[in-house]
Amino acid sequence: MPAVSICTDAFRITAEAMARTYGFPGFQYVSVPHPVASLSAEGIRQRVEEMLPRVLEILGVEE
């Protein structure tokens, strides 16, 4: 099943280190501004709209 990893920018270094450790340097994922836990439903909706083009790009889906 196709999937895309999403993490906040606070975890970018960790995400990249894990990708290298598991043999996937250059692994593509989506990074969003930290934090997300305190966002309202509207704030989350905005973040999703902002990251959706990148998610689709990683999945190889054309808009």
Image (cartoon, rainbow, N blue to C red):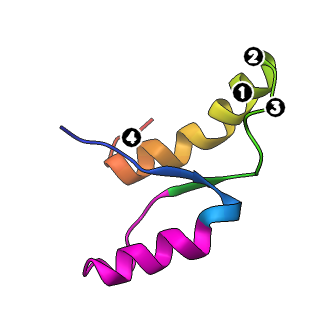
Say whether marks 1 and 2 touch (CB < 8 Å): yes
Secondary structure beneath disc 4?
A: loop
Residue 22 part of the magenta segment? yes
Q: Nearer the viewer, mark 4 or mark 3?
A: 3
Distance from disc 1 to disc 2, alpha carbons, whole Å, reads 5 Å
Distance from disc 1 to disc 3, alpha carbons, whole Å, reads 9 Å
Q: Nearer the viewer, mark 4 or mark 1?
A: 1
First in sequence, mark 4 or 1: give its number: 1
Please indicate whether residue 14 sits to the left or right of residue 18 in the image.
right
The tag on residue 62 is 4
- The three-letter code of the residue at mark 4 reads Glu
Residue hosting label 2: 41
State whether residue 21 is above or below residue 54. Answer: below
Task: Look at the image and tell me in which quarter the C terminus lies.
Answer: top left
Residue 34 image position (x, y, % from top left): 76, 51
Residue hosting label 3: 38
Residue 37 part of the magenta segment? no
Secondary structure beneath disc 2?
A: helix
Say whether marks 4 and 1 touch (CB < 8 Å): no
Magenta part of the chain: 12-29
State whether residue 41 is above or below residue 52. Answer: above
Name which residue lies at 36% across and 83% down: 20
Residue hosting label 1: 44
